[in-house]
């Protein structure tokens, strides 16, 4: 079901407002990949151009629904009102077990699991994607992809699942940066809480190197992993701190066998009434 929704979301392409996109993408120029600054800026430029083209074609395509081109910032509020959907963010460092534990929760509790990383990789591979190269470079460099791309992919996937009757969502690996957190909660839905996996870097490194033997991922190698750890500490941890100040974080220690972690996860969810 998840794979199908990912494809559908991708196939419809990414739609959002040009003005906001340009502004936000410009703001990402302040943190380009360390060793590929020019190339990244060039790619970001291409991204902006691509978004412009998408917007223009949406504007002029006959019968296109107005909502398809409505800029995110012009929305009067979140797409989903309180209680329409239940969103739980699943965070933790790379390799902390977010995907593994989310899959168990899907099996036992019928959550819809949407991994932001999986959605980005699917969009990257999608034939004809205007963001493929941009996404590939950010992922390889362990940096956070400009939020417009990720938020749009997630919104599309959530809407599609909601239309099919889904209500409870695990959003895995998101939000990884404050702008993602604020945009998602302003324009899509508030989160119920964040399930956070605490994990020592040493454990994550071992797991990721092991996973890298078969994952085929371009970022499961020592060089990318080092960058991902840095991004996690500098960019993603502030998001956890932000939600913690609102008393909206439940923490689970990752460093136990999968089933034992899962028992703790279930207890944590119970403490939040699930
Ligand atoms: P994340 O989604 O947070 O990056 P994954 O769920 O993909 O992490 O897990 C990373 C790797 O570690 C995978 O190969 C997975 O099989 C393994 N793994 C996950 N949880 C555990 C655990 N509790 N003990 C040992 N290995 C684990
Ligand atoms: O969660 P996962 O490890 O699959 O994410 C892989 C990569 O995708 C991240 O290192 C980052 O480059 C990108 N990503 C992102 N924003 C997110 C989630 C993932 O930019 N919210
Ligand atoms: Mg994962």
Image (cartoon, helix red, strand yellow):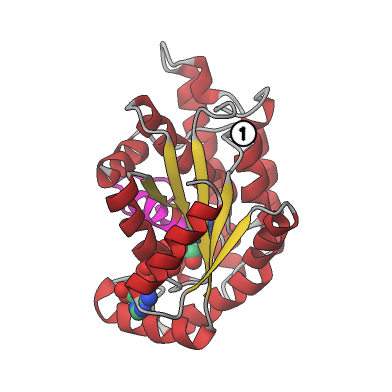
Q: Is residue 127 left or right of residue 81?
A: left
Residue 114 at x, y percent in the picture: 40, 48
- Where does the magenta region start and end? 117-136
Q: Is residue 242 left or right of residue 88?
A: right
Describe the element under mark 1 as helix, strand or loop: helix
Vertically, is 137 above or below 21? Answer: below
Residue 213 at x, y percent in the picture: 27, 81
Q: Quadrant of the N terminus?
A: top left
**Within the magenta stretch, is there residue 110?**
no
Residue 54 at x, y percent in the picture: 47, 32
* Crowd rating for badge 1 (residues with CA inside 10 Å; few <14, some 14–19, many 20+): some
Vertically, is 26 above or below 244? Answer: above
**Within the magenta stretch, is there residue 129?**
yes
Vertically, is 71 above or below 20? Answer: above
Q: Main secondary structure of the magenta part?
A: helix
Judge: label 1 CB < 8 Å from ligand 2: no
Residue 125 at x, y percent in the picture: 31, 54
**Residue that sits furthest to the right in the current view:** 245
- Which is more toward the observer, 259 or 116? 259
Residue found 47% across the figure and 17% down from its top: 60
Quadrant in which residue 42 is drawn:
bottom right
- Which is more toward the observer, 204 or 218? 204
Residue found 42% across the figure and 45% down from its top: 130
Is residue 34 in view from this perspective?
A: no
Q: Which residue is label 1 attached to?
A: 187
Residue found 43% across the figure and 74% down from its top: 95
Is residue 203 in view from this perspective?
A: yes
Count the numbered circles shown. Answer: 1
């Amino acid at each position: 079901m998840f794979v199908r929704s990912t494809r559908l979301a991708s196939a419809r392409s990414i739609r959002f407002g040009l003005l906001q996109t340009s502004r936000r993408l410009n703001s990402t120029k302040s943190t380009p990949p360390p060793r590929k600054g020019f190339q990244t800026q060039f790619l970001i430029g291409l991204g902006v151009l691509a978004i412009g083209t998408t917007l223009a074609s949406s504007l002029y395509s006959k019968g296109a629904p107005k909502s398809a081109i409505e800029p995110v910032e012009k929305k009067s509020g979140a797409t989903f009102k309180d209680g329409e959907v239940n969103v739980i963010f699943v965070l933790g460092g790379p390799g902390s077990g977010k995907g593994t534990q989310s899959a168990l929760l899907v099996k036992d509790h019928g959550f819809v699991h949407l991994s932001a990383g999986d959605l980005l990789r699917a969009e990257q591979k999608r034939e004809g994607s205007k963001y493929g190269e941009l996404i590939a470079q950010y992922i390889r460099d362990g940096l956070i992809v400009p939020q417009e791309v990720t938020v749009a992919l997630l919104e599309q996937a959530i809407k599609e699942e909601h239309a099919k009757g889904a209500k409870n969502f695990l959003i895995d690996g998101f939000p990884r940066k404050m702008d993602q957190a604020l945009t998602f909660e302003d324009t899509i839905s508030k989160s119920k809480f964040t399930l956070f996996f605490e994990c020592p870097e040493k454990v994550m490194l071992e797991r990721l190197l092991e996973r890298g033997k078969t994952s085929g991922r371009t970022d499961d190698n020592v060089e990318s992993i080092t960058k991902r750890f840095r991004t996690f500490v500098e960019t993603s941890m502030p998001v956890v701190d932000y939600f913690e100040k609102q008393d909206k974080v439940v923490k689970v220690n990752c460093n136990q066998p999968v089933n034992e972690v899962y028992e703790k996860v279930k207890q944590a969810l119970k403490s939040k009434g699930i």
